Image (cartoon, grey):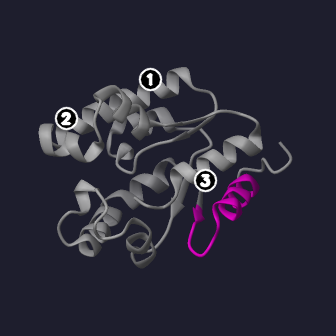
Amino acid sequence: MGVGKTTVGQVLAERLGTTFRDTDTDIVTAAGKEISEIFIDEGEPHFRELERQAVRTAMAEHRGVLALGGGAVLDEGTRTLLTGLPVVFLEMDVAAAVKRTGLDAPRPLLAVNPRQRWRELMEQRRPLYTEVARAVVSTEDRTPEDVADAVLDVLELKNA
């Protein structure tokens, strides 16, 4: 959360001359409400099902740069779909994440004790992120353009 997936993804898509898609945006569009509202109204399990469907649909339909929500890797089927693809895990530490997302941002999983909860989520998710990622790129103290350059370098797409 707050690592810059959407912004960096848009920069990457532009540099690669392709399209960009974000599964969180797909979910909001399909549901007709924000993710925080989905969590409140229908709960996290319902949101995760919407997320699974959004990822499968996007991966079947989209050939450009795709940003997945931070919890998408919790689903084993999603991790299987990502196997062998040029997946990049964008990472940052808790202080930078809290600074970027803010303590009052509408992020339902960070509603109570955001710093501690962010650490817990990362401890749970980091092994799953690294399982599917071909590369890990830090976003700390970098502009989205610098992160995009690092992603292109690590995926050996700099001259693509």
Kindly report the distance in space between the C-alpha atoms of the residues bearing marks 1 and 2. Answer: 17 Å
- For this rendering, which residue is in front, 34 or 48? 34
- Looking at the image, is mark 3 or mark 1 earlier in the sequence? 3
Identify the disc placed on residue 57: 1
Kindly report the distance in space between the C-alpha atoms of the residues bearing marks 3 and 1. Answer: 22 Å
Kindly report the distance in space between the C-alpha atoms of the residues bearing marks 3 and 2. Answer: 28 Å
Could you tell me what secondary structure mostly forms the magenta stretch? helix
Element type at marker 1? helix
- Looking at the image, is mark 1 or mark 2 earlier in the sequence? 2
- Image position of 57 with respect to 151: above or below: above
- Left or right side of 131 for 49: left
On the rendered image, what quadrant is the N terminus found in?
bottom left
Amino acid type, residue under disc 1 in the picture: Thr
- Left or right side of 3 for 32: left
Residue at coordinates 21% horizontally, 43% vertically from top-left? 37
Residue at coordinates 29% horizontally, 56% vertically from top-left? 107
Element type at marker 2? helix
Between tags 3 and 1, which lies in front?
A: 3
| Crowd around label 2: few <14 · some 14–19 · many ≥20 (10 Å) | few
Amino acid type, residue under disc 3 in the picture: Val
Residue at coordinates 29% horizontally, 74% vertically from top-left? 115
- For this rendering, which residue is in front, 157 or 130? 157
Total count of labels: 3
User: Mark 2 = which residue?
Assistant: 46
| Crowd around label 1: few <14 · some 14–19 · many ≥20 (10 Å) | few
Range of the magenta residues? 137-154
User: Mark 3 = which residue?
Assistant: 8
Work out which residue is located at the far top of the displayed protein and give it: 61
On the rendered image, what quadrant is the C terminus found in?
top right
- Looking at the image, is mark 3 or mark 2 earlier in the sequence? 3
| Crowd around label 3: few <14 · some 14–19 · many ≥20 (10 Å) | many
Residue 121 quadrant: bottom left
